[in-house]
Amino acid sequence: MSLVRRALPEDAAEVLRLRQVMIDDLPGGDASTAWHTEALPSLRERLGEADGDFAAFVVDHPDRPGALAALVVGTVDYRIGKAGNPRGLAGYVFSVATDPGARRRGYARACMDELLAWFRERGAGQVMLTASPAAEPLYTSLGFVPKPDPTMMLRL
């Protein structure tokens, strides 16, 4: 039996907690948690959509009932097709986090395996993510390769 399961609406607060763990580990991460209250209702709604373009996979914490040990979250987006992805469906992994007390047990890898299978089921022709230096070995072992894409962002 797999340790990994699809996150449910009742997991929303724990999903936000682990997302904050990831944010706190990023260079320049914002430690503020005030946004959690506003994010919670929409996250609960998205976690309740079993057939949508959003999925979160989790592992329950083995030592803390009601807590999560690991999390991965991704979406499938449509972009105009191109060589190598003519249907234009692309997966994007945007949250991977493991509780500090549950690291080095293979939970993130197990969650990533489930998310990648979910992307394949939906017909995604490629999957993108941004990797921290600490996570690069995991993603490389899963087949991800660095891309010289000059990403830019505008906050609205």
Image (cartoon, rainbow, N blue to C red):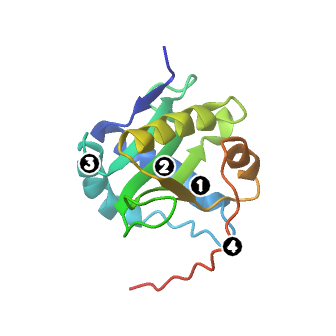
Residue type at the position of mark 2: Arg
Residue type at the position of mark 4: Pro
Q: Which quadrant of the figure contains the C terminus? A: bottom left
* Relative horizontal placement of residue 132, taking residue 93 as reference (left or right): right
Q: Secondary structure at mark 1?
A: helix
Mark 4 and mark 2: span between their CA atoms?
32 Å
Question: Residue 127: x and y, percent?
Answer: 52, 54
Q: Are marks 1 and 3 in contact (CB under 8 Å)?
A: no
Q: Is residue 156 above or below residue 23?
A: below
Residue at 70% from the left image edge and 62% from the top image edge? 146
Q: Which residue is mark 4?
A: 148
Mark 1 and mark 4: span between their CA atoms?
24 Å
Asked whether the viewer can see residue 94, the reply is no
Picture quadrant where residue 34 is located: bottom left
**Label placed on residue 52:** 3
Asked whether the viewer can see residue 103, the reply is yes
Pointer 3: residues within 10 angstroms few (<14), some, or many (20+)?
A: few
**Label placed on residue 85:** none
Mark 4 and mark 3: span between their CA atoms?
30 Å
Residue type at the position of mark 3: Gly
Looking at marks 2 and 3 on the same chain, the residue that comes earlier in the sequence is marked by 2
Tell me the mark number nearer the camera, choosing from 2 and 3. 3
Looking at marks 4 and 2 on the same chain, the residue that comes earlier in the sequence is marked by 2
Tell me the mark number nearer the camera, choosing from 1 and 3. 3
